[in-house]
Amino acid sequence: MDKNLERILPRVQKPARYTGGEYNAVMKDKGQVDTRFAFCFPDTYEIGMSNLGFRILYGVLNGMPGVWCERVFTPWPDMEEELRKNHIPLYALESGDPIGEFDIIGFSVGYEMAYTAMLNMLDLGGLPLRAEDRPGLTPLVIAGGTAMYNAEPVADFIDLALIGEGEELLPELVDLYRRAKKENWDKPRFLRAAVEIQGVYVPSLYNVSYHEDGTIAAIAPLDGAPEKVVKRVVHDMDKSYYPVKTIVPSTEIVHDRVTLEVFRGCIRGCRFCQAGYVYRPVRCRSREQLAEYAQASVRDSGYQEMTLSSLSTSDYPELVGLCDDLEAFCGKNHVNLSLPSLRADNFSMELMQRLQKGRKAGLTFAPEAGTQRLRDAINKNVTEEELTESLKTAFSGGWSSVKLYFMLGLPTETDEDVLGIAEMANHAVHTWREHASNKNRGLRLTVSTSWFVPKPFTAFQWEAQISRAEYERRVKLLREAITAKAVNYNWHDGDTSFLEAVLARGDRRLGRVLEAAFRKGARLDAWSDYFDLGRWLEAFEECGLDPAFYACRERSREEVLPWSMISCHVSDGYLWRQRELAYQSVTTPDCRTRCSGCGANIVEGGECYRG
Amino acid sequence: MYISHLDLLRTFQRVFLRQGMVLRHSQGFHPHPIISFALPLSVGQASDCEILDFEVNEDMDGAGLPEALNAFMPEGVRAVDCYVPVRPVRELARLRCRVELVYDGGVPARAAEEIRKLLLGESVVIQKRTKRKAMADIDIRPMLHSLDIQESACLLTLEAEVSAQNPGMNPALLAAAVEVHRPELSPDFVRVRRLAVLDAEGKVFR
């Protein structure tokens, strides 16, 4: 081990985050590979290692002969300080080599608040932040992940973004890179060739012009770049890679368990939900394959916890059957099965009995809004009766800890809707009194509200976020209306949600703001201990930009949105119709009930819904 | 070892499962595997000899198990031997350990002698955080049973036998004592390694 590192590690918190050497970490001989990929996760080890997408792509890339993919995470501030003080560049965990020595530096970006961590990682690697200051082909800086559906705020820093699912796209790009390296292409030539691959977005090949009022006048593709970059999807989940053999961290991470992805996409179409739109269409894994993967993963990892994961797991058609398939194996090996993302409208007795074998951790439901009118407006399609029914099932089955999630500031929300949340909480307490199987344990009911953040590629992408003052007024209104002692009310910190709203729908002029905020010390903005809105507001001021322009302004149908060069298959026209339906509180049925023609079926050549 | 005692325990639970061996579980509402380390190792210290106690459901003498387990270990952890316990862990009385004091600018003159004099003196009192988080004075001298110091250019190597339990001392306290009582001899870096576990007579514990 590096002498400096040996001395630093005993001084920092949780040093195992920085050592590598875990079970199943992929080691290759760097003399025997031609392409080295530094896979960067702009958050801590514990968060990054909990990300299934990160694990999938790590496995896919390392499955390519001649390619070695290694992991890099954001150091915690104590480690960052030591690295900087001792002039140790940010290194990859497998080889310990500085990221500047790699061919490709790839970021997995799920969340806007990670942008400054990206800049920090480049900076810690000793690399210039701006793509234009890195003229060579190597290292190529790329980014993918859900946040990259609007890559504009980081457009100045990356060479290209990958739009959509990476299992097929990323190897295609890496192969092109290998050819470019072998044939000594320069970076511009490589980038021009890369846009031929569906799903590759090269920000520098688009010229953005603005109106005087700050809105976008036009986005002009250059050098043969496509008008629309169309996302990539994996068509057949049964044939797509699943990381059965995956790294088992030696230290505890956030999701320290086998994560079994039962399906991708979501049939529901909640109008606020970006994932619900961009991951369309729904694609299920077969029950047989899931049972096989589950057993193989448990055997290989030695994990005794497993979670069935998706955007809405209780919508898996054969969920009860799958749980039955897994039962004997899980029982014998003391494996606990958990199911996040359950819907309040189909949490059944059957399902509960299957979950009951494990520990009764808390149950979480997300009704999102307090009245039927507003739930219809956002297309949540859960009724109060359904929630009551689910709670009845849970309480009589012995659960005593329930969390309910809501959003404040949804389009069309009134005070009546806010107070409806308190009413629902009171009803829940009442349901517990009537149906709890064991009242001695008491009830722990948590109501959480977040401040709604409008996101690109949703029916609400044109909406204004409500003002800070209005958000705080609604929090206060709700806080005063929740009277039951058993109810614990939590609300999200407003600073983070405000900046998230700015960055989510930002344009590329925000690059300067990001850089300024980073220079002022913005790093781990996703961590409330380290987030400071003050330095961001200063950065906006210095750059002459108004954050409210991005967060609190309603856009017109005609406005050119900063992400208009990207297509997630779901058409703008469809999203606009959904918005109009929202204002009429008219619901859209889920994809399983009836296809509503969103556009995602283009990929599947007509009927997109399967299973 | 840069992972905690609990992390290491979890790692072993998983290694057993990967190998296909089901550990005996406790009875009760939340069954847990019966597996424990005799003496938890501090984060940042190395060891040649940890004792792991575990129970299995089948009859076995442990032959071949280390090799079978090692195929499933993370880097830096290896099973060396496996046997049916013959002595209770409470008879594990001492640790043989190596504490390396690194001096980047060379070992100060007479350091070996001074440190020997300090550690083998009448008493060596240092402050230690108690379980209640308060600071308390403890004398580590009665827990130090033998000491040998070797000197090379930039390194003082202390080989010592210290009490392992009831009460035991962390070998890192030898370096701490130097820092407290002979601050001018404070090393730039300290490495600690457990070499062997011994019984009260100084014989290797098995």
Image: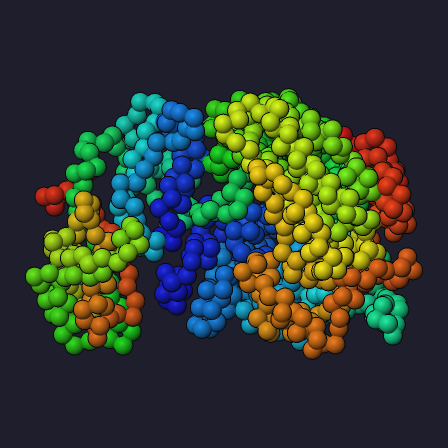
Q: Which residue occupies the foreground of this view, A460 or A115?
A: A460
Quadrant of the rendered image containing residue A191: bottom right
Q: Residue at x 43, y 37 (%)?
A: B14
Q: Which residue occupies the foreground of this view, A553 or A249?
A: A553
Q: Is residue A342 visible?
A: no
Q: Position of residue A135 (x, y in %)?
A: 68, 74
**In the displayed structure, would residue A250 be above or below residue A503?**
above
Q: Is residue A343 left or right of residue B30?
A: right
Quadrant of the rendered image containing residue A181: bottom right
Q: Is residue A37 left or right of residue A578?
A: left
Q: Position of residue B46 (x, y in %)?
A: 30, 53
Q: Residue at x 38, y 37 (%)?
A: B69
State the residue lying farthest toward the left.
B122
Q: Is residue B110 left or right of residue A403?
A: left
Q: Is residue A308 visible?
A: yes
Quadrant of the rendered image containing residue A260: top right
Q: Position of residue A446 (x, y in %)?
A: 60, 41
Q: In the rendered image, which quarter contains the N terminus of chain A?
A: bottom left
Q: Position of residue B3 (x, y in %)?
A: 39, 50
**In the displayed structure, would residue B81 be above or below residue A97?**
above
Q: Residue at x 31, y 22 (%)?
A: B59
**In the displayed structure, would residue A264 be above or below residue A219?**
above
Q: In the rendered image, which quarter contains the C terminus of chain A?
A: top right
Q: How is the image coloured?
A: rainbow
